[in-house]
Image (cartoon, rainbow, N blue to C red):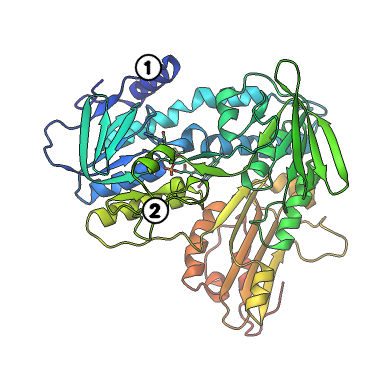
Amino acid sequence: MDVWGDSYTIGKWQDLIVETLESGDSTPIFNINPKDTREFDAIFLGGGAAGRFGAAYLRALGGRVLIIDRWPFLGGSCPHQACVPHHLFSDCAAQLMLERTFSSKLWFQNLEDKIVSIKNIVDLFRNGRTGPHAVMNYQSKEQLGLEFVLNAESEIIDANTVKIGKRKYQAKNLVLALGAKPLVADIPGASLKGVFNSLTLVEKLDYEPGNTIVVIGGGKSAIEYGCFFNATGRRTLVIARHQLMPMLKDAESRSYAILMMEEQGMEFLEYAEISNIQGDLQGKVKSVSIRTADGTINVDTDFVFMGLGEQANSEMIAQKLALETGEKGFIKINRHMQTSVHNVYAVGDVTGSPMEMFKARKEGVCAAKNIMGQTSEYKAADYPDFMHTHYEVCWLGLSEEEARQRHANVKVMKLPPDNPNGLDVGLPAGDRMMLYLMAKPRMSGFQKLIIDGDTRKILGAFHIGYGAKDGFQYLNFLVKKGLTIDDLADMDELFISPSYFIQLCRLRAGDPHFNNM
Ligand code: FAD
Ligand code: KPC
């Protein structure tokens, strides 16, 4: 079907997307300007974060660009299977932790021994996700003026040509923005019904998981989804081959995050691995065997979640174009986003880690600039990061340990202060933490700023609580520009904001030889 020239409202897009997804209709949706006779400067194969942002930037620079995607919407996996469900589940985990902490108190219902339906929340997502999809199509077509073909099975003919059905499209450049998919562990029983990952959870869950959940992995997805399952009231056992959450490098912040998860009932087995997943006669998971340093343990469960990282969606296309690929099929690129074939670029998850939206979008933009004749380089580095437990955990820069290895005079400002009686101290806390502050102070968060006492520059920041993530985006930018304790002391805090960094710095900044706090 051709939609060029028709005005599509968000509602009309949503109807079309729902109908297409539900019916499995494979008719492509063409949005191509028949009056524009210019050759395309680029075809973006994949219209997710990397493809959509790259294409929008290329058009903004005056070029002509076509996006082709196999899904009937733009925006890619983020709204369909990745960030959006992940944040929904993390919101639920935070809300449920609050409700369980205050169960039967104040206005809170009694949640003692109650299990919340996982399937209902997954169904809620499945029914709601076409809303963001429709906004992406509306924004791309009506506001950004992008040309695209959606719901399209395409064939790459060569580095300049893509075919959809009988129609052939030529471009000076090809940009592969194909994304990635979850890795599946090579464990006996991994293909049984009841073994999920972030993608299959939202596409395939058709029963209510029982009371015990086993999560494989110790990184972001494993912890984030594990905390959600735990918050629904289920026993949740996380099995990690290595140390848990290795990316959270500051030992004190890591310990607080893990302690709070344990206090919510999360169980962790580090340096352990699943040796076997056993099924019943219907081919459904019934138990797992876990190899630990102390021997093998068996756990009964009907739900196993793999949070093991990603592999590239590159297979056929990389082969067809003879592109150089690395581990897990990730396409090799230079700093201009060029692959081993000069007019073929690759951007986003298909090029490997970090698998984050900012990196995907910035790589897309970098490719667009190069295609349009600007010389642009990008390599993701020194970025802020975050993950969800039942809280939001944010960090940037150096951990205290890293800072002490590299700098002679490291100062630390943190809340709660070191306290011989433990964590039951009435601060930090901030927005969304005030109930914990009053009733269960040990749950009101942890925050830490790491400073070079000689140059007075901020070296690192860590925050466990809620609401600091927004600030960390800007803080990281300033830290990279050399932000000092004195600059922070001079800022205007919107009190009580979630992080106390500004006020702590102001209390100390007058002293040329300031101390820890
Ligand atoms: P995608 O968005 O996956 O886009 C690839 C596109 O290519 C898709 O639209 C697909 O349909 C299309 N495609 C693939 N093959 C073909 C083909 N042969 N022909 C046509 N089209 C094709 N990042 C964050 O920054 N914050 C988060 O909170 C966050 N949470 C996440 C949670 C989970 C569970 C996961 C898995 C990831 C999360 N990420 C998060 C990472 C983020 O989702 C990705 O980095 C981002 O979506 C990558 O964008 P992309 O454009 O490279 O790939
Ligand atoms: C949550 C949301 O903004 C929709 S998902 C974003 C997809 S894109 O803008 O293409 O990176």
Find the distance from the CA under tag 1 to the CA under tag 2.
Answer: 33 Å
Of the two numbered discs 1 and 2 on the same chain, state the one appearing first in sequence: 1
Residue 356 in sight here: yes
Q: Residue 517 appears at what percent x and percent y?
A: 72, 72
Front residue (pair 185, 197): 185
- The local crowd at label 2, few if under 14, some if 14 to 19, many if 20 or more residues have their Cα within 10 Å, is many
Which image quarter: residue 472?
bottom right
Asked if residue 370 lies left or right of residue 322, the reply is left
Residue visible at 64% across and 23% down? 119
Front residue (pair 149, 475): 149
Front residue (pair 481, 217): 217
Label 1 belongs to which residue? 25
- Mark in the foreground, 1 or 2: 1
Residue visible at 42% across and 17% down? 24
Pointer 1 residue Cβ closer than 8 Å to ligand 1: no
Label 2 belongs to which residue? 362
